[in-house]
Image: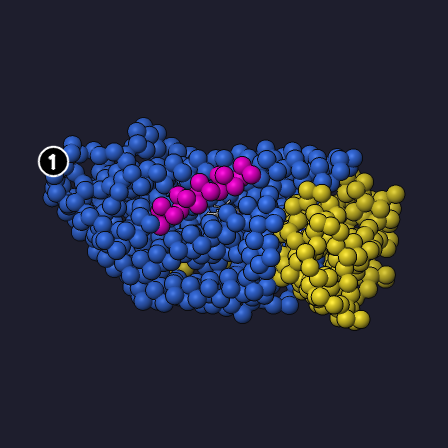
Chain colours: A blue, B yellow
Amino acid sequence: MTPTIAFLLALTFLISVGALLALVWSIATDQFSHGASAARTIFAAGEVGRAEDPAAGRHGLADAPRDATDEEAVTARREADLSSRVPVLTLLASAVVWLVVGSLYGLLSSLKMHMPELLADIEAVTFGRIRPMHLNAVAYGWASMAGLGAAVWLVPRLFKTPLMGAGYATAGAWVWNLGMVLGLVSIGAGLSDGEEWLEFPWQVDALFVLAGGLCAVPLLLTVRNRQVRHLYVTSWYLMGALIWFPLLFLLANLPYLFPGAAGATVNWWFAHNVLGLWVTPIGVGIAYYMIPKILGKPVISYRLSLLGFWSLALFYSQVGIHHLIGGPVPTWLVTLSIVHSVMMVIPVVTVAINHHGTMIGHFGRLRDSPTLRFVWIGSLMYTASSLQGSMEALRSVNVVTHFTHYTVGHAHLGMYAFLSFILFGAVYFIMPRITGWEWPSRRLIVLHFWLAFSGIIIYVVALSIGGWFQGLALLDGDTAFMETVRLTLPYLKARSVGGALMTASHLLFAGHFLTLLWLGGRPADRPTLFRSTIPEGRT
Amino acid sequence: MTRTIAIMAGAALILLFATLMLVVMPYTQMAGAPVPDELEAYSEAELRGREIYISQGCVYCHSQQPRDPGFSNADQQRGWGRASVPGDYAYDQPHLMGTMRTGPDLFNIGARQPSETWHYIHLYNPRAVVEDSIMPAYRYLFRVVREPLPSDTVVNIPDPYGPEHGTVVTTREAKDLVAYLKALDHTYPVETLPHKQKGDANGR
Ligand code: HEM
């Protein structure tokens, strides 16, 4: 390691620690007035102590005010929700379509890994094409669009003023969809750019930068009109995500700029930032809104939540090279990413304290509120997958798990059990509010939950065990390579079972979503909960 | 509004800082890495083959980055070659290092398996040469003809894996792909290795 690099390395570390200390100081001395009052920004007067889900009290309409103090809150919510209706519906409906498409590609990829002759003669569905199609469909189609939909829906609620410039977001959604179609068709036709997470041809990528920018316009327009003094932590996460993603996506996709080994560092720096600086802040931000709102209780430590935000920005932006541990890139770079991966424990623990701490005393609500159940399980899995990730970055663990199916298990714990669960919860919450129709069937929601939950547990457990054994076998030079393939087969088959359950749950979910839209659901006179809090027959 | 701008600017600055560390610095360092003397640039056919490798998605199952024996010795024992160094990738655009080893590392497959015929049969149906292989078959990169022309390269597929009638011949795609695989030979010595290692691809 040259002295310059050693110096720069030390410098970055000092800057990071310095920035963190400055932040701790500013919060401790109340420089931003981030006290308990700030945590109540998302509630209207008199709303604390009242759950929004189930919004219905014992009388009439699900979202009808219960008394005079409720009046203001309910009217404000209605206005906010109505103003974001069109773009949110467009984004969420598109996301559900990509979820189904993506899961089917995922399931087919999984089957092909233990049945290599399945549909082997059709070039467009060879494993090496449908696997990236799966990733791009679920990451950019489902997760990103559902996340954007929830973000656009949250903006007027957070700023307590109707959404401005909704048309930009709607246009953004359609440009995004166009990009998805062109991108997936290109991969299927064999026109991939060749790097993981960046497979879409760069010409198509321009559409995503444009669409992302369009979706950010309403945020900027609305924030100017805002009626709240303090910006609630969810808005920090959303603003962060919406500024990071276009920058990252543009930089990483610039064609012909980064050759050879440097290209690999840019590739993985980007790929992990899609997770860390795009979908994670959106997921965490949604949970920061939903959990307090559903419980009618502010988060327990608002100051911690801001510490969590800035430490996430500082540390998550530099973890990417842990995908190249032991690879042909400078050692200092790998070390830097490992250090930051371990430091990620800080933001993760702050989020965990807030989300789980706020839940304490209210776990009973998991039995009735579908949104709470999905969102809180998602948040719990965020804690789990992030701590797992910090461990995986350690050299001694990574030497086993790198290059194996273990990583894929970890990826699904994060992208699915954490993020997708929170997004499912958000869709269940948002749809009745923007359409005025309730979910038609409680049973379908229950079934969706249990299929998805059991599916992902089977998926992750199977690949974690199988991947670990695969890694140990790969490390033993005396084991014939084919042995490492054969020993994974039972686990790959189990993954297909788990994946089939997940896919089935998505088909039900999409069907339910369509029914809600086409048949108009039932009028929202009573929320669809896992169990009825209202004795049957009484309205 | 100022607070909004402050948050967004702060977020963007942090990202900029990370970009300096994780993109610009490694780039300047690795761009200056010496290109090994014996590393040859790809030929036209090999480059076309590389495009096939990309479009068929071989990278999702095969890595191209043998590990440093100080980290894990198994790669050398399996004959996958010495640890790779940044200079080895001087002509690789985009990089194809990969992160999965569902199949073996291919960075030195050209040295390990020089037989074109083996590659053709293996691509036509991996199970014809390796029992239980889970690698996909790439039969669509071949043609079945009744009477091969003199210019055709005939591939004799062992029973029962061949077609019922006719003879299997290569397409240009298959030839280019195998040309690329044979070019994957980084067994020459390099000076910048972190640990002392033999340059022999077979690790013997
Ligand atoms: C909808 C939620 C899902 C999300 C967000 C998701 C996300 C991902 C991600 C991020 C990867 C890349 C993993 C890596 O390279 O380390 C991946 C790969 C994969 N996923 Fe999913 N996935 C989802 C659902 C599914 C389902 C339902 C299946 C069905 C079995 C599935 C099967 C696969 C397979 C087979 C791979 C390729 C693994 C490999 O190359 O070895 N996924 N997915």
Report which quarter residue A87 is drawn in: bottom left
Residue nearest the observer in this picture, B171 or A299: B171
Residue A136 horizontal side relative to residue A28, left or right: right
Q: Is residue A130 visible in the rendered structure shown here?
A: yes
Q: Residues within 10 Å of mark 1 (few under 14, many from 20)?
A: few
Chain containing the residue with disc 1: A
Magenta segment includes A505: yes
Residue nearest the observer in this picture, A467 or B30: A467
Residue A53 horizontal side relative to residue A192, left or right: left
A333 up-or-down from A495: above or below: below
Q: Is residue B32 visible in the rendered structure shown here?
A: no
Residue that carries the numbered disc 1 in the rendered image: A538
Give, as a single range, the part of the protein colored magenta: A493-510
Residue A411 appears at what percent x and percent y?
A: 53, 44
Chief secondary structure of the magenta portion: helix
Residue A498 appears at what percent x and percent y?
A: 48, 39
A47 up-or-down from A144: above or below: above
The residue shown at (35%, 50%) is A510
Tell me which amino acid carries mark 1: Arg
The residue shown at (28%, 36%) is A530
Residue nearest the observer in this picture, A13 or A265: A265
